[in-house]
Image (cartoon, helix red, strand yellow):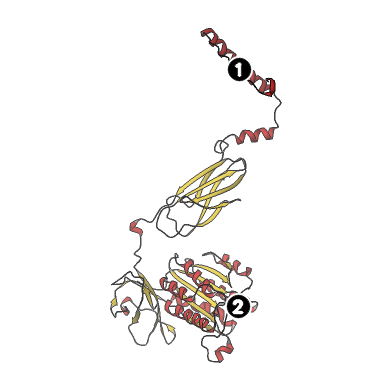
Amino acid sequence: MAAGGKERTTIVKVQLGDRGRHALVGFIVGLGAAGLALAATAPAASGAAAGQASAAARPAAQRGMQIQMVSPPSGTPAFGEVDLAVKVKSPVPLKWVDYYVDGQRAGRVEAPPWKLRFDVGQSNAGHQVRAIAEDVLGGKGEALVKTGSIASDMSFDVRLQQLFVSVTNAGQAVQGLGQGDFEIVNDEGDRESITTFGGGDLPISSVLLLDSSESMKGEPLKAALAGVRAFVDRTRADDETMVAFFSDRILAATTFTKDDQALQQALGEVKAAGGTAVNDHLYYALNRLQPRLGRRVIVLLSDGLDVSSSIDMEQVLARARRSQAMIYWLRLDDPAAAAAGGGAPKYASIWRGYDDNARQYGLLEQAVTESGGRILKIRQLGEIDDAFRQVIDELRQQYVLGFQPRDARGRGNWRPLRVRVRGDEFAVRTRAGFVD
């Protein structure tokens, strides 16, 4: 240290010959050996700390972490909601697993079984799914899988329109008709060629949409649950059902499942509460049904008195027209109103006045009728379970007609149509049109 507290650095240049350089190298090697000897004689750290420090210094793969993507399967097409899941073996506990789909973070799971439910969309395209696991020491492991897409020879012509047709005579279903007994007439009066024809054996994908608002407390909700059980008891192995309980929000909902036992267990966990948002949840049900296969059906149990929806029924009607789902409305009628002559109930809500609520109610009726479904009036709670049975029995007895519009315009317009059956004594009900 120099006077005044300042450090002074002195650089000495030394010119060494060959012997000097050899001596300098030997001196440096000697220092290294001495350092190793000192390290060897230093007190040992605790076994646990030393082991963790050693483990932390090694990459996760070197510590024995093994991570394998088990879902979705590699090369398999993936649509809608899928499970993202990995199988991890690690001697060090994990903190979390992060999932990425097509480069975007899908979510984080912080506990076994390290599974995440994620909607990959409906586009026919492969996806890249990546999982990154991190252990408590900061080490990471990674797995990657690529899903496939449907090959061109497996694709479907989206222009194909399907009509589910109920034919009755004096209220009884008419069976045994053939393709030649039907004709489809478009909005210009021309006949459409029927390209596919079948009976009622097509699988059913259904959403049972149950009003569980405050007014459904007690016996009404019990009767509704009995109706769901009656419907589920009549489903077949290839049918899939979703049950959603709603008020001004979703109170409970199952996924689409073929497991009758799982559906039955879900029914005992619901309590009625809140207002009623029919429009919002009918729109929700239509969206949930859109990617499903087979015959798509919504069974709505409600009085239809919407007081909480933010969506206008005009939007729901437009969505229903673009869907091929049928809507059945099990309408809980007020006996006093029915005795007074029926018609749209007159009421005001926080969002809408008398006239607007009447318009919403009328549009709901229109959406049901246009879809090919129908309104079943419920005047007593004991009628609910039989109404559910009527719906599924009717679905089993329908005819399925497929056609490709002869003059498709692709403008997104609603185009009315009619289905006629040979024989004037028959009543025919099906969708009232399609969106071109």
Residue at screen point 51% across, 72% down:
311
Q: Is residue 92 above or below residue 259?
A: above
**Closest to the observer: 232 or 81?**
81
Check the image and report above or below for 399 versus 92: below
Q: In this orientation, does residue 128 appear? A: yes
Q: Which element is circle 2 on?
A: helix
- Residue 1, how many percent across, how many down? 68, 20
Seen at 55% across and 13% down, the residue is 13
Residue 77, quarter of the rendered image:
bottom left
Residue labelled with disc 2? 223
Name the foreground residue: 245 vs 25.
Answer: 25
Can you tell which of label 1 and label 2 is closer to the viewer? 1
Q: Marks 1/2: CA distance? A: 97 Å
From the top left corner, tell me how far across and down residue 291 is, in percent: 44, 64
Q: Residues within 10 Å of mark 2 (few under 14, many from 20)?
A: some
Q: Which mark is residue 79?
A: none
Disc 1: which residue? 10
Please give the name of the residue rendered at 58% of the width and 78% of the height, measured from the top-left corner: 350
Question: Going 61% across and 35% down the picture, which residue do you hit?
Answer: 55
**Residue 206 visible in the displayed image:** no
- Identity, as a three-letter code, of the amino acid under mark 1: Thr
Identify which amino acid the numbered label 2 is placed on: Ala
Relative side of 419 to 115, left or right: left
Name the image quarter holding the C terminus: bottom left
Q: Which residue reaches farthest front?
A: 4
* Residue sticking out furthest to the bottom: 340
- The kind of secondary structure element at disc 1 is loop
Question: Is the residue 199 above or below the residue 424 in the image?
Answer: above
Image location of residue 97, percent across then percent down:
56, 48
